[in-house]
Image: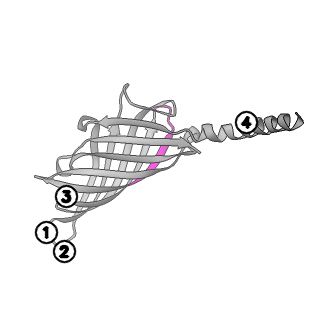
Amino acid sequence: MFRNIALGMTITLAMVLTAPVAIAQQKHHISYDTPATQTVYTQQHVIDVGDIPGHQARLFEIRRTYGDDAPLINGSRLKEQWTRGMSDYIDNNGPALIYNVWILENGEKFFVRTSLVAQSSGDGKLTNMTSGVITGGTGSLARIRGIISSHGPSEPKAGLNANQTDIDYWME
């Protein structure tokens, strides 16, 4: 009988001590679209590399804004996203390295580093696919971690960009 009580207390203690870890590791998934009407290229600087025709190095900054139907992240609504990146395209095909800052309506932020691959669809248009990691945040998001992926059409010279984003996140 003493063994059963001791075993029961050990199991209960183990559950109590590991519950916060399990709760902290709970994963959340959100998926949303950002139309071109909510996206603005605020800066673009393009340099022709000069080695082959169409090879360009580009620095860019994009601002995305969200309204009342924006997704919730950790209980707060997404307000805006800033994307800053460097691309190395040949005729709108190639890689880019991107840094993102997501800002929630409560002022907290989280940060993401992604890699992008662009594929030209002709006439200055391209399709982009990104994948990356959440590297941290501020306030209650200081311990946020996760994976982000997105894809969508873009037309950099015309300043058009839209995407569909999937975020899987958790708190460490």
Is residue 160 part of the magenta span, yes or no?
Answer: no
Looking at the rendered image, the disc whose residue lies closer to the viewer, 4 or 1, is: 4
> Residue 66 appears at what percent x and percent y?
35, 32
Query: Which tag, 2 or 4, sits closer to the chain's start?
Result: 4
Contact, mark 2 vs mark 4 (Cβ under 8 Å) = no
- Mark nearest the camera among 3 and 4 is 4
Magenta residues, as a range?
105-114
Question: Among all residues in the image, which is located at the extreme front?
Answer: 1
Is the N terminus in the top left, top right, bottom left or bottom right quadrant? top right
Q: Nearer the viewer, residue 111 or 158?
A: 111
Residue 71 screen position, x and y as percent: 41, 31
Q: Secondary structure at mark 4?
A: helix
Q: Which residue is mark 4?
A: 16
Residue contact between numbered discs 4 and 1, judged by CB atoms under 8 Å: no
> Disc 3 marks which amino acid?
Asn
Three-letter code for the amino acid on which mark 1 is drawn? Pro
Camera-side mark, 2 or 4: 4
Q: CA distance from mark 1 to mark 3?
A: 12 Å
Q: Which residue is mark 2?
A: 51
Q: CA distance from mark 2 to mark 3?
A: 15 Å
Q: Position of residue 155 (x, y in %)?
A: 19, 48
Mark 4–mark 1 Cα distance, whole angstroms, equals 64 Å
Relative to 5, residue 58 above or below: below
Which comes sooner in the sequence, label 3 or label 4? Answer: 4
- Residue situated furthest bottom in the rendering: 51
Q: Which mark is residue 92?
A: 3
For residue 53, the mark is 1
Within 10 Å of the Cα at label 4, are there few (<14), some (14-19), or many (20+) other Cα atoms? few
